[in-house]
Image (tube, helix red, strand yellow):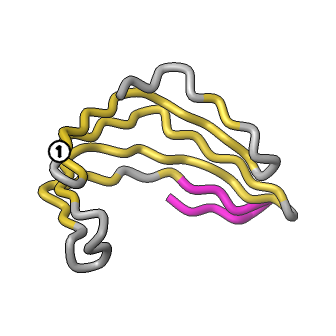
């Protein structure tokens, strides 16, 4: 969903299923599965975003990765990561 009547805002859902990065980033090869649900807005020169659902599994450089949690931040580089489990 994209709406820019007062500002630009968005909401999305990204499902990863065997995403590999070896060609794009050979020094950081990874294979990831998961779900990312971002939402945010841009008004004037400021933005804010929130990821109320973040779940990733897989590996990065042959190291197991398991991420589950939430995060939010803004253009002032203020980040809140209350429940991110790595």
The part of the image, by quadrant, that contains residue 37 is top left
Give the answer, above or below, for where 69 lies relative to 12.
Answer: above
Q: Secondary structure at mark 1?
A: strand
Query: Quadrant of the image for the C terminus?
Result: top left
Q: Taking 81 as reference, is 83 left or right?
A: left
Which residue is disc 1 drawn over? 58
- Magenta region: 1-10
Identity of the residue drawn at 18% across and 65% down = 20
- Where is residue 15? Give x, y as percent: 25, 52
Q: Nearer the viewer, residue 3 or 57?
A: 57
Label tally: 1
Q: Nearer the viewer, residue 10 or 51?
A: 51
Q: Taking 18 as reference, is 83 left or right?
A: right
Is residue 9 inside the magenta stretch? yes
Give the answer, above or below, for where 12 lies relative to 3.
Answer: above
Residue lying furthest bottom: 23
Identity of the residue drawn at 48% across and 47% down = 38
Residue lying furthest top: 83
Q: Nearer the viewer, residue 50 or 12?
A: 50
Is residue 6 inside the magenta stretch? yes
Crowding at mark 1 (Cα within 10 Å: few <14, some 14-19, many 20+)? some
Identity of the residue drawn at 34% across and 28% down = 68
Give the answer, above or below, for where 61 lies relative to 70.
Answer: below
- Where is residue 41? Give x, y as percent: 68, 53
The part of the image, by quadrant, that contains residue 34 is top left
- Where is residue 51? Give x, y as percent: 50, 39
- Where is residue 67? Give x, y as percent: 32, 33
Identity of the residue drawn at 86% across and 63% down = 45
């Amino acid at each position: 969903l994209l709406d820019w009547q007062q500002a630009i805002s968005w909401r999305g859902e990204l499902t990863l299923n065997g995403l590999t990065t070896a060609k794009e980033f050979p020094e950081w090869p990874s294979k990831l599965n998961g779900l990312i649900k971002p939402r945010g807005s841009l008004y004037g020169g400021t933005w804010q975003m929130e990821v109320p659902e973040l779940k990733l599994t897989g590996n990065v450089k042959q190291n197991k990765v398991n991420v589950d949690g939430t995060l939010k931040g803004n253009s002032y580089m203020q980040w809140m990561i209350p429940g991110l489990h790595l």
